[in-house]
């Protein structure tokens, strides 16, 4: 009998350290509202972008940048091509006109072909969630750089779990799940921002907790901001292309 005492002790100690969620519905409760019906999207090919899910907000319609503006204000000067858009050198970052909260974000990008430069000076751009938290875009195909600065890194914080990059000029995908931070009325941080990223279908960021906004060679602390903010794309002086951008906001459970 004695051998049972230790496992029981361990089990009860483990339970005490976490909070089991309280679900306000009985198991298999037929009065519980069922999920909304949507039509899922279709995958992209190199030749053409796939279809977004029916409930997604389209951030690029394939023809113009009407959902975007320059981060400095005014219309964006980035170039629009056949079904894609491209950073304009010296054009500066662009931001969405609308703000978004916690989200699933789909991004497709292609780095310049033939490639130019090396390290951080090669196919560099970036996807800034809430204008502050960068998922790095870089040509990381046969291109050495520091670990937390490669493609799909949470810039200067978390390297991707693997380097799943495709060659220059090839369309690549990011599927990002991002939860922004939360702040109390007095500005106290009450929840960390978290990011999960799939790069070309491969899990590369597994629900990592951000230390604050991302920045070159520093890790600045969180500063309070509203739960919805525009999305920003980085102009790093390289002609990186984007297509098929869409976002689905995640309902705030709080
Ligand atoms: Mg960048």
Image: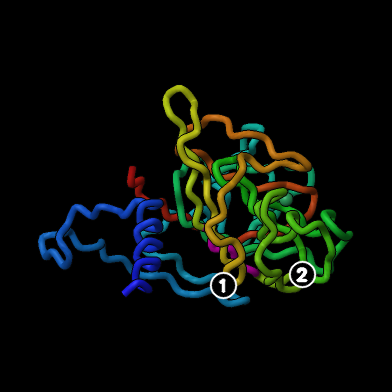
Give x and y (percent) for residue 79.
69, 52
The magenta stretch spans which residues?
172-176
Q: Quadrant of the N terminus?
A: bottom left
Residue placed at 59% from the left, 61% from the top?
205
Nearest the eye: 250 or 238: 250
Nearest the eye: 38 or 74: 38
According to the picture, the residue beneath numbered tag 2 turns out to be 168
Asked if residue 244 can be seen in this view, the reply is: no
Placement of 151 over or under 213, stated as above or below: below
Rate crowding at label 2 as few (under 14), some (14 to 19) or many (20 or more) other CA atoms within 10 Å: many
* 56 to the left or right of 121: left
Nearest the eye: 197 or 26: 26
Placement of 123 over or under 70, stated as above or below: below
The tag on residue 201 is: 1
From this viewpoint, which residue is outermost toward the front?
2
Nearer the viewer's eye, disc 2 or disc 1? 1
Placement of 124 over or under 34, stated as above or below: above
At mark 1, the secondary structure is loop
Rate crowding at label 1 as few (under 14), some (14 to 19) or many (20 or more) other CA atoms within 10 Å: few
């Amino acid at each position: 009998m004695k051998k049972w005492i230790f496992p029981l002790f361990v089990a009860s100690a483990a339970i005490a350290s976490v909070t089991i969620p309280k679900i306000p519905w009985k198991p298999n409760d037929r009065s519980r509202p069922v999920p909304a019906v949507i039509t899922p999207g279709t995958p992209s090919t190199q030749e053409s972008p796939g279809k977004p899910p029916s409930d997604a907000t389209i951030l690029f319609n394939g023809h113009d940048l009407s959902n975007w503006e320059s981060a400095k204000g005014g219309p964006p000067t980035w170039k629009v091509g056949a079904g894609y858009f491209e950073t304009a050198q010296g054009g500066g970052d662009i931001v969405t006109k609308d703000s978004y909260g916690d989200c699933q974000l789909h991004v497709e990008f292609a780095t310049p072909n033939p490639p130019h430069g090396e390290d951080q000076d090669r196919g560099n751009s970036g996807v800034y969630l809430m204008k502050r938290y960068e998922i790095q875009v870089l040509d990381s195909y046969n291109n050495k750089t520091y670990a937390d600065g490669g493609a799909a890194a949470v810039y200067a914080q978390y390297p991707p779990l693997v380097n799943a990059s495709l060659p220059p000029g090839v369309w690549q995908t990011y599927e990002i799940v991002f939860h922004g931070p939360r702040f109390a009325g007095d500005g106290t941080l009450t929840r960390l921002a978290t990011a999960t990223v799939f790069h070309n279908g491969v899990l590369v960021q597994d629900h990592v907790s951000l230390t604050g906004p991302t920045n070159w060679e520093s890790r600045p602390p969180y500063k309070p901001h509203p739960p919805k903010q525009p999305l920003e794309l980085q102009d790093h002086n390289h002609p990186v292309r984007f297509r098929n951008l869409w976002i689905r906001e995640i309902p705030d459970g709080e």
